[in-house]
Image: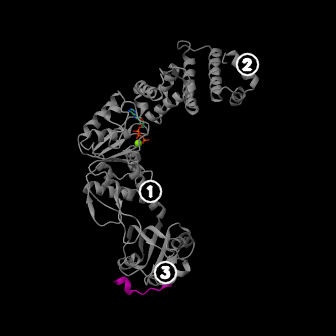
Amino acid sequence: MEEKDINITTEDAENLLGDGQWKDIIRSLDEGIHIVDQQARTILYNQSAAEIEGLKPREVLGKSIFAVFPSLTYENSTLMQVLAQGEEVEQSQQTFVNMKGQQITTVNKTVPLLFSDNTLGAMEISRDITLIQEMAENVNNLRNKFGAAARSSVDSDKLAGSATALSNNTSYTFADLIGENEDFQQVLNDAVRAAGSDSSVLIIGETGTGKELFAQGIHNASTRASKPFIAQNCAALPRELLESLLFGAEKGSFTGASTRPGLFEQANGGTILLDEINALDYDLQAKLLRVLQEGRVRRVGGQKEKKVDVRVLATMNKTPEEAFDEGSLRQDLYYRLSVVSLTIPPLRERRNDIPLLLEHFISHYNQKFERSIKGVTAKLKEALFKYDWPGNVRELQHMIECGFNLLQKEPFIGFAALPLHQRQKLSNLQQGEAIELAKTLHGGEVPNLNDYLDEVEKQLIKRALNKTEGNISAAGRLLDISRQSLYYKIKKYELE
Ligand SMILES: Nc1ncnc2c1ncn2[C@@H]1O[C@H](COP(=O)(O)OP(=O)(O)OP(=O)(O)O)[C@@H](O)[C@H]1O
Ligand SMILES: [Mg+2]
C-alpha cells in the first residue's frame, strides 16, 4: 500500500493531532477513544477507553496494540483494517471479556486519520452499551413472559363494547371507534378499505386521537387477524436497544449476547405497529427501509438473512412536512410507509362528536363502576365545546373517569367534579365567554358602563375564588385588593 511506504514517526502523528484544547476534550469524552499511528502504536488512549477495556492508559500508551491485546491479529483488528484500507469501519455491536474479566458490549466506529490522502493513523471510538444490552435482554424476556400485555401499548382501560381482549394481543376493532364527524368517517372508511390490502399504512394524528385504535382495527379486519400484532414505540428506547429488539441479535464471535429473534421475526405473518416512527434513529430508518423493500431481516451481529412476511403500520404525531423540516424522517422511508396515509382529525376539529363521545364514555364508566350518572351539567358541556383538547379523545375520557371518581351522589358531572387543573382551564374559558356576554347583555347596544363594569368585576372575582377554591384572603391577594373590600363585593354580587 502506498500509505505504508511513507514512514511517519509517532511524533509526526502526534503533531498531526496538534496541541491544545481538543486533546483535553477527547480525554474527557464518555466514548472510549483509541488512536494508533501507522505502526499500530497507541498515541492517544482516553480514560473511557481504559475503563471499557479494563486497563490503565499507561499500560497502553506508546505500545503496539499486539503487545497489549494478545488476542488481536492483523485480520481481526479493526484498527489494522482501517490503517490498511484507509476507509471507515463501523461495527454495530461487539461483546467481549475485558482485561479485568468483565463482559462488555460496545459499538465501535474506526476512522482513518488522513493527511494529504495518506493514512497517518486510525482512531477507534467505542461506546459502552453493556447496560443497554442487558436492558434489551430484560425487555425481551418480559415481552415473552407477559405476551399480550407487554406487547400492546394501548391504554390499559378497555372500552365498553368489547369487554375482553382479543386472542391476538389486541383489544380493539373498528367497531370501537366512535365518531360521526364527516372527516372522521372519511378516515375510517379509508382505514376499512386499507385493511383489505397488505400495504403499509402511515397513521398521522395528535396524541390521543386514536392512532393505536385505528392500527388494531386494521389488523383485526385484515387476513392477518389470527396472527400476531406487535406494537413498539420508537421513541422509548435508545438506538442500539431498538435495533436488536426489532431485528434480533446473534451471539457474536465473542462471548456474551444471547441469540434471539427480533420483533420482525416474532410478528411473522402478522402486523408490526411502529409508534412515533419519526423518533427512530435516522440510520435505523434506512435499515428498516431495506427490510421493508427486501422482506428479509438480518440479526445484529448475524450473517444470514431470514425471510419475513410482516405488514408494517406506523404512526406519527406530526405532519410529514414538519418531520422533514426538522430532519427526523427520511423521505425514502416515508414514501415506502405511506402507501396509504390516514390523518385523524384532532378533537377540536370535530367538536360535533363531543356529545357522542361523552355519552359513550359515561355509559362505559357507569357499567364499570356500577353507577348511574346521567351526563354532564349544561354549563360544563358549554365549556367542553369551547375547549381546545390538546390531549384529544384520551383527555376527554380521563376527564369523565375523574368525574366518576370525585362525584358523590349527584347525577351530573359538573365543574366541581373535575381535576383542579382542568377546572381552571375550563372555567377560564367560561369567564372569557362571560365577558363577551356582558358586552352583548344589552341586545348589541352599547351597554351602560357601570352595569358592564360590574359584570366584568363580578366575573373576575368568581374566577379568583374558583382558583383559590373559595379562599377569600388568597383571592384578594390575586386581585390585589383587601380582604374587606373583596368581602364587601362578594356580598354585593351575591357570590357566596
Ligand atoms: N374515536 C375514538 N373512539 C373511542 N375511543 C377513542 C377514540 N379515539 C381515542 N379513543 C380513546 O383514547 C385513548 C387513546 O387512544 P390511542 O391510544 O389510540 O391514541 P394515540 O393516537 O395512539 O395517542 P398517542 O400518540 O399518545 O399514542 C384510547 O385508549 C381510547 O380509549
Ligand atoms: Mg399511541
Quadrant location, the C terminus: top right
Residue depicted at 73% across the width and 21% down the height: 487
The residue drawn where x is 57% and y is 33% is 421
Q: Which numbered marker is on residue 488? A: 2
Tell me the element at label 3: strand
Q: How many marks?
A: 3
* Of 312 and 474, the residue lying toward us: 312
Q: Is residue 127 above or below residue 158?
A: below
| Residue that appears at 63% across and 14% down | 451
Type of colouring = one colour
Q: Is residue 47 left or right of residue 159?
A: right
**Residue corresponding to mark 3:** 42
Residue 176 lies, in percent from the top left, at 35, 32
Nearer the N terminus, badge 3 or badge 2?
3
Earlier residue among tags 2 and 1: 1
- Residue 385: mark: none
Is residue 363 a member of the stretch shown in magenta? no
Q: CA distance from mark 3 to mark 2?
A: 83 Å
Residue on which disc 1 sits: 138
- For the residue pair 479 and 163, the one nearer the viewer reads as 163
Does the magenta-highlighted stretch encompass residue 5? yes
Amino acid type at circle 1 is: Asn
Q: Does the image show residue 427?
A: yes
Q: Callout 1: few (<14), some (14-19), or many (20+) C-alpha neighbours within 10 Å?
A: few
Relative to residue 236, is residue 112 depicted above or below? below
Q: Which residues are magenta?
A: 1-15
- Percent across and percent down for residue 325 are 41, 49
Quarter of the image containing the N terminus?
A: bottom left
